[in-house]
Image (cartoon, rainbow, N blue to C red):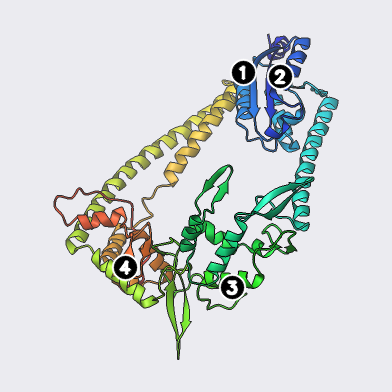
Protein backbone atom coordinates (compact mmCIF):
# COMPACT_ATOMS: atom_id res chain seq x y z
CA UNK A 1 0.00 0.00 0.00
CA UNK A 2 1.64 3.28 -1.06
CA UNK A 3 1.95 6.49 0.93
CA UNK A 4 -0.89 8.30 -0.88
CA UNK A 5 -3.41 5.58 0.04
CA UNK A 6 -2.23 5.62 3.65
CA UNK A 7 -2.64 9.42 3.68
CA UNK A 8 -6.24 9.12 2.54
CA UNK A 9 -7.01 6.63 5.33
CA UNK A 10 -5.21 8.73 7.98
CA UNK A 11 -7.69 11.01 9.77
CA UNK A 12 -5.44 12.38 12.53
CA UNK A 13 -4.98 16.13 12.94
CA UNK A 14 -3.24 18.52 15.34
CA UNK A 15 -4.48 21.90 16.54
CA UNK A 16 -2.46 25.10 16.83
CA UNK A 17 -4.02 27.75 19.07
CA UNK A 18 -2.49 31.18 19.66
CA UNK A 19 -3.55 34.26 21.55
CA UNK A 20 -1.76 37.48 22.49
CA UNK A 21 -2.68 39.28 25.70
CA UNK A 22 -4.54 42.09 23.92
CA UNK A 23 -6.68 39.63 21.96
CA UNK A 24 -8.27 37.97 24.99
CA UNK A 25 -11.12 40.47 24.76
CA UNK A 26 -11.67 39.97 21.01
CA UNK A 27 -13.31 36.54 21.22
CA UNK A 28 -9.93 35.00 20.36
CA UNK A 29 -9.43 33.20 23.70
CA UNK A 30 -7.80 29.78 23.56
CA UNK A 31 -10.99 28.10 24.76
CA UNK A 32 -13.06 29.71 21.99
CA UNK A 33 -10.49 28.70 19.37
CA UNK A 34 -10.34 25.13 20.68
CA UNK A 35 -14.14 24.82 20.71
CA UNK A 36 -14.49 25.97 17.07
CA UNK A 37 -11.69 23.67 15.89
CA UNK A 38 -13.05 20.69 17.85
CA UNK A 39 -16.53 21.10 16.37
CA UNK A 40 -15.14 21.22 12.82
CA UNK A 41 -12.94 18.16 13.50
CA UNK A 42 -15.97 16.21 14.73
CA UNK A 43 -18.02 17.15 11.67
CA UNK A 44 -15.24 15.94 9.36
CA UNK A 45 -14.49 12.79 11.35
CA UNK A 46 -10.99 13.98 12.26
CA UNK A 47 -9.19 12.66 15.34
CA UNK A 48 -7.29 15.35 17.32
CA UNK A 49 -4.04 13.75 18.50
CA UNK A 50 -2.17 16.82 19.80
CA UNK A 51 -2.94 20.45 20.73
CA UNK A 52 -0.28 23.20 20.74
CA UNK A 53 -1.20 26.29 22.77
CA UNK A 54 0.75 29.55 22.28
CA UNK A 55 -0.11 32.09 24.98
CA UNK A 56 0.90 35.75 24.86
CA UNK A 57 2.89 35.36 21.62
CA UNK A 58 2.86 37.73 18.66
CA UNK A 59 2.13 36.46 15.16
CA UNK A 60 4.59 38.98 13.71
CA UNK A 61 7.39 36.43 13.91
CA UNK A 62 7.79 32.72 13.34
CA UNK A 63 10.06 32.49 16.41
CA UNK A 64 7.48 31.00 18.79
CA UNK A 65 8.21 27.95 20.98
CA UNK A 66 4.89 26.15 20.42
CA UNK A 67 4.97 26.77 16.67
CA UNK A 68 8.49 25.34 16.56
CA UNK A 69 7.26 22.32 18.54
CA UNK A 70 4.35 21.90 16.11
CA UNK A 71 6.62 21.87 13.05
CA UNK A 72 9.02 19.44 14.72
CA UNK A 73 6.11 17.18 15.69
CA UNK A 74 4.86 17.19 12.10
CA UNK A 75 8.28 16.25 10.79
CA UNK A 76 8.54 13.30 13.19
CA UNK A 77 4.95 12.10 12.67
CA UNK A 78 4.37 13.01 9.03
CA UNK A 79 3.04 9.52 8.26
CA UNK A 80 0.45 9.62 11.06
CA UNK A 81 -0.79 13.25 10.80
CA UNK A 82 -3.08 14.27 7.97
CA UNK A 83 -3.57 17.97 8.71
CA UNK A 84 -2.88 20.99 10.93
CA UNK A 85 -5.94 22.99 12.00
CA UNK A 86 -6.09 26.61 13.23
CA UNK A 87 -8.99 28.91 14.15
CA UNK A 88 -7.94 31.53 11.57
CA UNK A 89 -4.98 31.90 9.26
CA UNK A 90 -3.68 34.89 11.24
CA UNK A 91 -3.30 32.55 14.25
CA UNK A 92 -0.43 30.93 12.36
CA UNK A 93 1.20 34.14 11.14
CA UNK A 94 0.36 37.73 10.27
CA UNK A 95 3.40 37.93 8.01
CA UNK A 96 2.54 36.64 4.54
CA UNK A 97 6.08 35.41 3.86
CA UNK A 98 6.18 33.44 7.13
CA UNK A 99 2.77 31.88 6.44
CA UNK A 100 3.79 30.76 2.95
CA UNK A 101 7.02 29.22 4.28
CA UNK A 102 5.14 27.30 6.99
CA UNK A 103 2.48 26.24 4.49
CA UNK A 104 5.16 24.98 2.08
CA UNK A 105 6.88 23.01 4.87
CA UNK A 106 3.60 21.26 5.69
CA UNK A 107 2.89 20.60 2.00
CA UNK A 108 6.33 18.99 1.51
CA UNK A 109 5.58 16.73 4.49
CA UNK A 110 2.29 15.73 2.88
CA UNK A 111 0.27 17.40 5.65
CA UNK A 112 -2.80 19.47 4.87
CA UNK A 113 -3.84 22.81 6.38
CA UNK A 114 -7.31 23.69 7.69
CA UNK A 115 -8.78 26.95 8.99
CA UNK A 116 -11.90 26.47 11.14
CA UNK A 117 -13.40 29.78 9.96
CA UNK A 118 -11.97 30.29 6.45
CA UNK A 119 -11.88 28.36 3.17
CA UNK A 120 -8.63 26.36 2.84
CA UNK A 121 -7.46 23.34 0.84
CA UNK A 122 -4.90 22.03 -1.62
CA UNK A 123 -6.58 23.19 -4.82
CA UNK A 124 -4.96 26.18 -6.62
CA UNK A 125 -7.99 28.34 -5.90
CA UNK A 126 -7.85 27.38 -2.19
CA UNK A 127 -4.15 28.25 -1.97
CA UNK A 128 -4.81 31.55 -3.70
CA UNK A 129 -7.50 32.41 -1.14
CA UNK A 130 -5.15 31.39 1.71
CA UNK A 131 -2.47 33.75 0.38
CA UNK A 132 -4.98 36.59 0.12
CA UNK A 133 -6.16 35.95 3.70
CA UNK A 134 -2.55 35.84 4.98
CA UNK A 135 -1.75 39.09 3.15
CA UNK A 136 -4.90 40.61 4.66
CA UNK A 137 -3.76 39.58 8.13
CA UNK A 138 -0.36 41.19 7.56
CA UNK A 139 -2.01 44.33 6.20
CA UNK A 140 -4.22 44.53 9.30
CA UNK A 141 -1.19 44.09 11.55
CA UNK A 142 0.82 46.73 9.65
CA UNK A 143 -2.10 49.16 9.87
CA UNK A 144 -2.31 48.65 13.62
CA UNK A 145 1.42 49.33 13.97
CA UNK A 146 1.20 52.43 11.79
CA UNK A 147 -1.78 53.73 13.78
CA UNK A 148 0.11 53.20 17.03
CA UNK A 149 3.14 55.11 15.69
CA UNK A 150 0.91 57.85 14.30
CA UNK A 151 -0.87 58.09 17.64
CA UNK A 152 2.40 58.55 19.53
CA UNK A 153 3.59 61.11 17.00
CA UNK A 154 0.31 63.03 17.23
CA UNK A 155 0.59 63.02 21.02
CA UNK A 156 4.09 64.47 20.67
CA UNK A 157 2.83 67.11 18.19
CA UNK A 158 0.05 67.98 20.65
CA UNK A 159 2.67 68.83 23.29
CA UNK A 160 2.06 65.80 25.53
CA UNK A 161 4.96 63.67 26.86
CA UNK A 162 5.15 60.08 25.61
CA UNK A 163 5.17 57.35 28.23
CA UNK A 164 5.54 57.73 31.99
CA UNK A 165 5.59 61.27 33.34
CA UNK A 166 9.01 62.47 34.60
CA UNK A 167 9.73 62.76 38.32
CA UNK A 168 7.78 65.70 39.73
CA UNK A 169 4.85 65.17 37.34
CA UNK A 170 2.05 62.63 37.08
CA UNK A 171 -0.09 61.12 34.31
CA UNK A 172 -3.74 62.14 34.65
CA UNK A 173 -6.69 61.04 32.48
CA UNK A 174 -8.84 63.92 31.35
CA UNK A 175 -11.75 62.86 29.17
CA UNK A 176 -10.29 60.52 26.53
CA UNK A 177 -6.73 61.89 26.78
CA UNK A 178 -3.93 61.20 29.20
CA UNK A 179 -2.26 64.46 30.13
CA UNK A 180 0.63 65.45 32.42
CA UNK A 181 0.26 67.63 35.51
CA UNK A 182 2.59 68.61 38.36
CA UNK A 183 2.59 66.21 41.31
CA UNK A 184 1.63 68.32 44.34
CA UNK A 185 4.16 66.69 46.69
CA UNK A 186 7.08 66.11 44.31
CA UNK A 187 7.03 69.11 41.95
CA UNK A 188 8.47 71.66 44.39
CA UNK A 189 11.06 69.19 45.73
CA UNK A 190 12.41 68.40 42.25
CA UNK A 191 12.42 72.15 41.44
CA UNK A 192 14.40 72.71 44.64
CA UNK A 193 16.86 70.03 43.50
CA UNK A 194 17.35 71.82 40.16
CA UNK A 195 18.06 75.07 42.02
CA UNK A 196 20.58 73.33 44.29
CA UNK A 197 22.50 71.58 41.49
CA UNK A 198 22.60 74.87 39.55
CA UNK A 199 24.82 76.35 42.29
CA UNK A 200 27.62 74.03 41.16
CA UNK A 201 28.42 72.95 44.72
CA UNK A 202 26.93 69.43 44.61
CA UNK A 203 27.84 66.30 42.68
CA UNK A 204 25.18 63.95 41.32
CA UNK A 205 26.13 61.46 44.04
CA UNK A 206 25.47 64.07 46.71
CA UNK A 207 22.26 65.15 44.97
CA UNK A 208 21.03 61.54 45.01
CA UNK A 209 21.55 61.36 48.77
CA UNK A 210 19.81 64.70 49.32
CA UNK A 211 16.83 63.87 47.09
CA UNK A 212 16.44 60.47 48.77
CA UNK A 213 16.42 62.19 52.16
CA UNK A 214 13.54 64.34 50.90
CA UNK A 215 11.56 61.18 50.15
CA UNK A 216 11.82 61.33 46.36
CA UNK A 217 11.83 57.90 44.71
CA UNK A 218 12.04 56.35 41.25
CA UNK A 219 8.95 54.34 40.36
CA UNK A 220 9.05 51.18 38.22
CA UNK A 221 5.70 49.47 37.93
CA UNK A 222 4.22 49.48 41.41
CA UNK A 223 7.55 49.56 43.25
CA UNK A 224 9.49 52.59 44.50
CA UNK A 225 13.30 52.63 44.55
CA UNK A 226 15.89 54.99 45.98
CA UNK A 227 17.48 57.33 43.46
CA UNK A 228 20.99 56.51 42.27
CA UNK A 229 23.51 58.97 40.91
CA UNK A 230 22.91 57.66 37.36
CA UNK A 231 19.16 58.25 37.69
CA UNK A 232 19.72 61.74 39.07
CA UNK A 233 22.07 62.51 36.19
CA UNK A 234 19.38 61.48 33.68
CA UNK A 235 16.89 63.79 35.44
CA UNK A 236 19.23 66.77 35.18
CA UNK A 237 19.95 65.96 31.52
CA UNK A 238 16.27 65.96 30.53
CA UNK A 239 15.11 69.06 28.66
CA UNK A 240 11.48 68.09 29.31
CA UNK A 241 11.60 70.06 32.59
CA UNK A 242 11.90 73.30 30.58
CA UNK A 243 8.48 72.70 29.00
CA UNK A 244 10.02 71.49 25.74
CA UNK A 245 9.52 68.03 24.21
CA UNK A 246 12.36 66.47 22.26
CA UNK A 247 12.82 62.76 21.49
CA UNK A 248 15.50 60.77 19.65
CA UNK A 249 12.89 59.21 17.37
CA UNK A 250 12.00 62.72 16.11
CA UNK A 251 15.52 64.20 15.92
CA UNK A 252 14.64 67.28 13.86
CA UNK A 253 11.56 68.35 15.79
CA UNK A 254 11.02 70.24 19.01
CA UNK A 255 7.59 70.98 20.46
CA UNK A 256 6.44 73.28 23.27
CA UNK A 257 4.75 71.07 25.87
CA UNK A 258 1.22 71.64 27.13
CA UNK A 259 2.17 71.36 30.79
CA UNK A 260 3.71 73.59 33.44
CA UNK A 261 7.51 74.02 33.04
CA UNK A 262 9.61 73.44 36.14
CA UNK A 263 12.72 75.48 35.16
CA UNK A 264 13.86 77.97 32.53
CA UNK A 265 16.05 77.08 29.54
CA UNK A 266 18.81 79.29 30.95
CA UNK A 267 18.86 77.26 34.16
CA UNK A 268 18.84 74.00 32.21
CA UNK A 269 21.89 74.93 30.11
CA UNK A 270 23.71 76.24 33.16
CA UNK A 271 23.24 72.85 34.81
CA UNK A 272 24.48 71.12 31.63
CA UNK A 273 27.71 73.12 31.79
CA UNK A 274 28.15 72.14 35.42
CA UNK A 275 27.58 68.45 34.67
CA UNK A 276 30.03 68.65 31.74
CA UNK A 277 32.77 70.02 33.99
CA UNK A 278 35.32 72.35 32.43
CA UNK A 279 34.44 72.66 28.75
CA UNK A 280 37.54 73.18 26.60
CA UNK A 281 35.85 72.33 23.30
CA UNK A 282 33.47 74.88 21.75
CA UNK A 283 29.80 73.88 21.54
CA UNK A 284 29.01 72.16 18.26
CA UNK A 285 32.54 70.97 17.51
CA UNK A 286 33.48 67.31 17.72
CA UNK A 287 35.49 66.23 20.71
CA UNK A 288 38.41 63.90 20.15
CA UNK A 289 37.71 60.97 22.48
CA UNK A 290 40.78 58.87 21.60
CA UNK A 291 43.21 61.67 22.40
CA UNK A 292 46.80 60.40 22.73
CA UNK A 293 47.34 62.94 25.54
CA UNK A 294 44.78 61.09 27.69
CA UNK A 295 45.29 57.29 27.46
CA UNK A 296 43.72 56.73 30.90
CA UNK A 297 40.39 58.43 30.05
CA UNK A 298 38.49 55.16 29.59
CA UNK A 299 40.53 53.11 32.06
CA UNK A 300 40.35 55.08 35.33
CA UNK A 301 37.04 55.78 37.06
CA UNK A 302 35.98 58.01 39.91
CA UNK A 303 36.16 56.03 43.17
CA UNK A 304 32.98 57.69 44.48
CA UNK A 305 30.47 57.79 41.60
CA UNK A 306 31.99 55.12 39.34
CA UNK A 307 31.96 57.23 36.18
CA UNK A 308 35.05 57.22 33.93
CA UNK A 309 37.32 60.23 34.35
CA UNK A 310 37.12 62.78 31.57
CA UNK A 311 40.01 64.96 30.46
CA UNK A 312 40.93 68.10 28.62
CA UNK A 313 43.44 70.89 28.13
CA UNK A 314 43.21 73.79 30.59
CA UNK A 315 44.67 77.16 29.71
CA UNK A 316 47.48 78.61 31.75
CA UNK A 317 49.27 81.96 31.44
CA UNK A 318 51.47 80.89 28.55
CA UNK A 319 50.29 77.43 27.46
CA UNK A 320 47.71 74.71 28.01
CA UNK A 321 48.01 71.85 30.51
CA UNK A 322 46.38 68.38 30.32
CA UNK A 323 44.12 67.46 33.25
CA UNK A 324 41.79 64.65 34.31
CA UNK A 325 38.62 65.20 36.38
CA UNK A 326 35.30 63.63 37.37
CA UNK A 327 32.20 64.84 35.49
CA UNK A 328 30.22 64.83 38.75
CA UNK A 329 32.86 66.96 40.51
CA UNK A 330 33.57 64.22 43.07
CA UNK A 331 37.34 64.72 42.69
CA UNK A 332 39.84 67.51 42.39
CA UNK A 333 41.33 68.03 38.95
CA UNK A 334 44.62 66.18 38.58
CA UNK A 335 47.39 66.90 36.06
CA UNK A 336 47.79 64.19 33.44
CA UNK A 337 51.46 63.61 34.23
CA UNK A 338 50.69 63.27 37.95
CA UNK A 339 48.11 60.52 37.36
CA UNK A 340 50.48 58.68 35.02
CA UNK A 341 53.28 58.92 37.65
CA UNK A 342 50.96 57.23 40.15
CA UNK A 343 50.22 54.52 37.56
CA UNK A 344 53.90 53.96 36.79
CA UNK A 345 54.61 53.54 40.51
CA UNK A 346 51.85 50.93 40.66
CA UNK A 347 53.38 49.07 37.70
CA UNK A 348 56.77 49.06 39.43
CA UNK A 349 55.14 47.55 42.52
CA UNK A 350 53.85 44.55 40.56
CA UNK A 351 57.01 44.13 38.47
CA UNK A 352 57.86 40.37 38.44
CA UNK A 353 61.36 39.20 39.31
CA UNK A 354 63.78 37.91 36.68
CA UNK A 355 63.50 34.45 38.25
CA UNK A 356 59.69 34.53 37.79
CA UNK A 357 60.06 35.65 34.17
CA UNK A 358 62.51 32.82 33.41
CA UNK A 359 60.25 30.24 35.04
CA UNK A 360 57.14 31.55 33.27
CA UNK A 361 58.74 31.45 29.81
CA UNK A 362 60.04 27.92 30.53
CA UNK A 363 56.53 26.75 31.47
CA UNK A 364 55.14 28.57 28.44
CA UNK A 365 57.56 26.82 26.08
CA UNK A 366 56.90 23.39 27.68
CA UNK A 367 53.12 23.86 27.53
CA UNK A 368 53.34 25.05 23.94
CA UNK A 369 55.40 22.02 22.89
CA UNK A 370 52.87 19.64 24.51
CA UNK A 371 49.90 21.31 22.85
CA UNK A 372 51.61 21.40 19.46
CA UNK A 373 52.30 17.68 19.75
CA UNK A 374 48.63 17.05 20.52
CA UNK A 375 47.54 19.24 17.62
CA UNK A 376 49.84 17.40 15.21
CA UNK A 377 48.35 14.08 16.30
CA UNK A 378 44.81 15.44 15.86
CA UNK A 379 45.63 16.79 12.42
CA UNK A 380 47.13 13.47 11.37
CA UNK A 381 43.97 11.67 12.52
CA UNK A 382 41.75 14.23 10.77
CA UNK A 383 43.72 13.90 7.52
CA UNK A 384 43.26 10.12 7.60
CA UNK A 385 39.54 10.42 8.41
CA UNK A 386 39.04 12.95 5.61
CA UNK A 387 40.64 10.60 3.10
CA UNK A 388 38.41 7.72 4.24
CA UNK A 389 35.26 9.90 4.02
CA UNK A 390 36.09 10.99 0.47
CA UNK A 391 36.64 7.34 -0.51
CA UNK A 392 33.24 6.48 0.99
CA UNK A 393 31.65 9.31 -1.01
CA UNK A 394 33.21 7.98 -4.22
CA UNK A 395 31.90 4.47 -3.53
CA UNK A 396 28.43 5.86 -2.71
CA UNK A 397 28.26 7.75 -6.05
CA UNK A 398 29.46 4.69 -7.96
CA UNK A 399 26.91 2.47 -6.20
CA UNK A 400 24.11 4.88 -7.01
CA UNK A 401 25.10 5.01 -10.67
CA UNK A 402 25.05 1.20 -10.78
CA UNK A 403 21.59 1.14 -9.17
CA UNK A 404 22.82 -0.42 -5.94
CA UNK A 405 21.31 2.36 -3.83
CA UNK A 406 17.86 3.93 -4.19
CA UNK A 407 17.49 7.70 -4.55
CA UNK A 408 16.29 8.05 -0.93
CA UNK A 409 19.22 6.09 0.50
CA UNK A 410 21.68 7.91 -1.74
CA UNK A 411 20.36 11.36 -0.77
CA UNK A 412 20.40 10.64 2.99
CA UNK A 413 23.89 9.05 2.94
CA UNK A 414 25.26 11.79 0.67
CA UNK A 415 23.99 14.51 3.05
CA UNK A 416 25.49 12.73 6.05
CA UNK A 417 28.88 12.28 4.35
CA UNK A 418 28.94 15.89 3.13
CA UNK A 419 28.36 17.13 6.70
CA UNK A 420 31.15 14.90 8.06
CA UNK A 421 33.56 15.95 5.30
CA UNK A 422 32.83 19.63 5.93
CA UNK A 423 33.38 19.36 9.70
CA UNK A 424 36.58 17.35 9.19
CA UNK A 425 37.94 19.82 6.63
CA UNK A 426 37.35 22.61 9.15
CA UNK A 427 39.49 20.72 11.68
CA UNK A 428 42.23 20.18 9.10
CA UNK A 429 42.25 23.74 7.72
CA UNK A 430 41.84 25.47 11.08
CA UNK A 431 45.12 24.18 12.45
CA UNK A 432 47.25 26.77 14.30
CA UNK A 433 50.49 24.87 13.69
CA UNK A 434 51.84 27.48 11.28
CA UNK A 435 50.25 30.57 12.78
CA UNK A 436 52.58 31.28 15.72
CA UNK A 437 56.32 31.58 16.23
CA UNK A 438 57.07 30.57 19.82
CA UNK A 439 60.59 32.05 19.75
CA UNK A 440 59.37 35.53 18.75
CA UNK A 441 56.57 35.28 21.31
CA UNK A 442 58.99 34.48 24.15
CA UNK A 443 61.32 37.34 23.16
CA UNK A 444 58.34 39.68 23.18
CA UNK A 445 57.07 38.48 26.59
CA UNK A 446 60.50 38.79 28.18
CA UNK A 447 60.84 42.38 26.94
CA UNK A 448 57.38 43.22 28.22
CA UNK A 449 57.71 41.70 31.69
CA UNK A 450 61.27 42.93 32.23
CA UNK A 451 60.08 46.52 32.70
CA UNK A 452 56.31 47.12 32.77
CA UNK A 453 56.60 50.86 33.40
CA UNK A 454 59.04 51.25 30.48
CA UNK A 455 56.68 49.22 28.27
CA UNK A 456 53.88 51.65 29.10
CA UNK A 457 56.00 54.76 28.48
CA UNK A 458 57.19 53.75 24.98
CA UNK A 459 53.80 52.43 23.80
CA UNK A 460 51.36 54.47 21.74
CA UNK A 461 47.77 55.31 22.76
CA UNK A 462 46.20 52.01 21.66
CA UNK A 463 49.05 49.90 23.05
CA UNK A 464 48.77 51.61 26.44
CA UNK A 465 45.05 50.91 26.56
CA UNK A 466 45.53 47.21 25.77
CA UNK A 467 48.48 46.83 28.18
CA UNK A 468 46.69 48.35 31.18
CA UNK A 469 43.45 46.48 30.39
CA UNK A 470 45.31 43.16 30.32
CA UNK A 471 46.96 43.84 33.70
CA UNK A 472 43.90 45.40 35.41
CA UNK A 473 40.86 43.82 33.66
CA UNK A 474 38.39 45.38 36.14
CA UNK A 475 39.88 48.84 35.62
CA UNK A 476 41.20 51.29 38.20
CA UNK A 477 39.54 53.86 40.44
CA UNK A 478 41.05 57.11 41.72
CA UNK A 479 40.25 58.78 45.07
CA UNK A 480 42.32 61.99 44.72
CA UNK A 481 45.54 60.36 45.97
CA UNK A 482 45.68 56.67 45.03
CA UNK A 483 44.68 54.18 42.36
CA UNK A 484 42.36 51.65 44.01
CA UNK A 485 40.58 48.42 43.02
CA UNK A 486 43.69 47.48 41.08
CA UNK A 487 42.93 43.75 40.95
CA UNK A 488 45.62 42.10 38.87
CA UNK A 489 44.62 39.65 36.15
CA UNK A 490 45.24 35.93 36.89
CA UNK A 491 48.08 35.62 34.38
CA UNK A 492 50.12 38.47 35.92
CA UNK A 493 49.27 37.29 39.42
CA UNK A 494 50.56 33.81 38.62
CA UNK A 495 53.75 35.21 37.12
CA UNK A 496 54.40 37.12 40.36
CA UNK A 497 53.75 33.97 42.40
CA UNK A 498 56.29 31.95 40.41
CA UNK A 499 59.13 33.34 42.48
CA UNK A 500 57.58 31.52 45.49
CA UNK A 501 58.56 27.81 45.68
CA UNK A 502 55.29 26.84 47.37
CA UNK A 503 53.10 28.49 44.73
CA UNK A 504 50.80 26.32 42.61
CA UNK A 505 51.78 27.04 39.05
CA UNK A 506 49.40 27.19 36.13
CA UNK A 507 49.40 28.91 32.75
CA UNK A 508 46.57 31.19 31.69
CA UNK A 509 45.76 32.29 28.15
CA UNK A 510 48.14 34.85 26.72
CA UNK A 511 49.07 38.44 27.44
CA UNK A 512 47.25 40.95 25.27
CA UNK A 513 49.34 43.82 23.92
CA UNK A 514 51.34 44.93 20.90
CA UNK A 515 54.52 46.58 22.03
CA UNK A 516 56.46 49.42 20.49
CA UNK A 517 59.77 48.23 18.92
CA UNK A 518 61.69 50.59 21.23
CA UNK A 519 61.25 48.17 24.12
CA UNK A 520 62.81 45.20 22.32
Q: Which residue is mark 4?
A: 482
What residue did someone put label 1 on?
Answer: 77
Which residue, given by chain and number where applicable, does mark 2 sit on?
Answer: 34
Extreme residue in the bottom direction: 318
* Residue 38 against residue 18 in the figure, above or below: above
Q: Disc 3 and disc 4: Cα gap in Å?
A: 32 Å
Looking at the image, residue 222 lies above or below residue 350: above
> Is residue 423 among the parts visible in the rendering?
yes
**Relative to 462, 139 lies left or right:** right
Q: Residue furthest right?
A: 125
In percent of width and height, residue 430 lies at: 43, 47
Residue 465 position in % (x across, y down): 40, 65
Q: Which residue is mark 3?
A: 270
Front position among marks 2 and 1: 2
Which image quadrant for residue 54? top right
Residue at 74 percent across and 30 percent down: it is 25
Amino acid sequence: MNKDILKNINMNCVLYLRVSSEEQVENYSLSNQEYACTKLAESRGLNIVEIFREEGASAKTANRPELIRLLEYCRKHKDSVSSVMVYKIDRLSRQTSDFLKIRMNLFELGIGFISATEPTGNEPSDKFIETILAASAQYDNDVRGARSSQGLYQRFRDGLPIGKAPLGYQNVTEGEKQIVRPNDTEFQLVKKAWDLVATGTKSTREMAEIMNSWGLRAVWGKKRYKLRSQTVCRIFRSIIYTGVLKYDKYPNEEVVGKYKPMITREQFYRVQDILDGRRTTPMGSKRKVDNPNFPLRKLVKCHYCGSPLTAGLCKGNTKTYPYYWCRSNCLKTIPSNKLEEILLDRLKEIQPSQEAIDLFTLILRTTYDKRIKTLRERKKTADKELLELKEMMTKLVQGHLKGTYSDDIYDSQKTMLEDKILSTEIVVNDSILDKYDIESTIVFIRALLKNLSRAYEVSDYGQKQVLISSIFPSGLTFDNTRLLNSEISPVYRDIQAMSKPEAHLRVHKGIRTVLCPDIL
